[in-house]
Image (tube, rainbow, N blue to C red):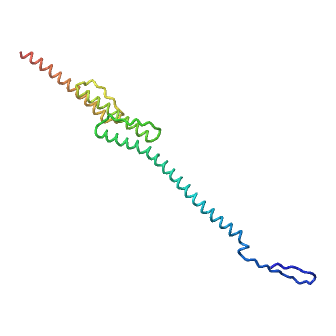
Amino acid sequence: FAPIKLGNTGKAWSVMIKVHQDIVLSNVQKLENDMVAQNKSNTVWQIIVGVVIAFLAMSVLWFSARSIAQPVQRAAQLAKAIREGDFSHRLNHDSKDEVGDLSKALDQMAESLQGQVDVAERISQGDLNQDVRLASDRDQLGLALQRMVKNLNRLVSDVRAGSAQITDNAGQVS
């Protein structure tokens, strides 16, 4: 209702117009229908984009995990070979991360142990003039090899001295 003044009567008049609700709200209903359709379309696109991003993320994670897992598996195989006494294998994995550090340390350990094996092999062939290099001041195997060379050299010296004494005594007896 909207009051209207007509003439000089001093009384307000009002006019009532009746319009059906569907006519008044037709633009609103059309807008609502458009928004619902747009919402469905947006939801479908969001799901598609979400699935694509999830697939890409899974792919990146899979490749990242694989690039870490393979060298670690190879390191475990090298450690198993070393445990079994085979020091000939090397990883030769060159990277600037923790896996590269682990690979380099395992390669150096295998190299050091192979060097100690070579020294022990030459000693077993009778070459007692071996210089046993220690990997560190805590190198138990290297220290044991040094003691073994020292003790074998002392034993050989004692046997030579005993042999010389026996030869001298045999000469006196004859």
Task: Tell me residue 122's x, y (percent).
Answer: 26, 27
Total marks drawn?
A: 0
Task: Tell me residue 123's x, y (percent).
Answer: 25, 27
Q: Quadrant of residue 117?
A: top left
Task: Tell me residue 62's x, y (percent).
Answer: 46, 48
Q: Name the residue: 32% across, 30% down.
A: 115
Q: Residue furthest left?
A: 174
Q: Residue furthest right?
A: 8
Q: Name the residue: 82% across, 78% down.
A: 2
For this rendering, which residue is in front, 89 or 58? 58
Is residue 77 shown above or below 27?
Answer: above
Say which quadrant the C terminus sits in: top left
Horizontally, residue 157 falls left or right of residue 15, namely left
Q: Quadrant of residue 22?
A: bottom right
Q: Name the residue: 52% across, 55% down.
A: 51
Horizontally, residue 23 falls left or right of residue 124, namely right
Say which quadrant the N terminus sits in: bottom right
Q: Quadrant of residue 84?
A: top left
Horizontally, residue 57 falls left or right of residue 117, namely right
For this rendering, which residue is in front, 154 or 84? 84
For this rendering, which residue is in front, 154 or 105? 105
For this rendering, which residue is in front, 19 or 125? 19
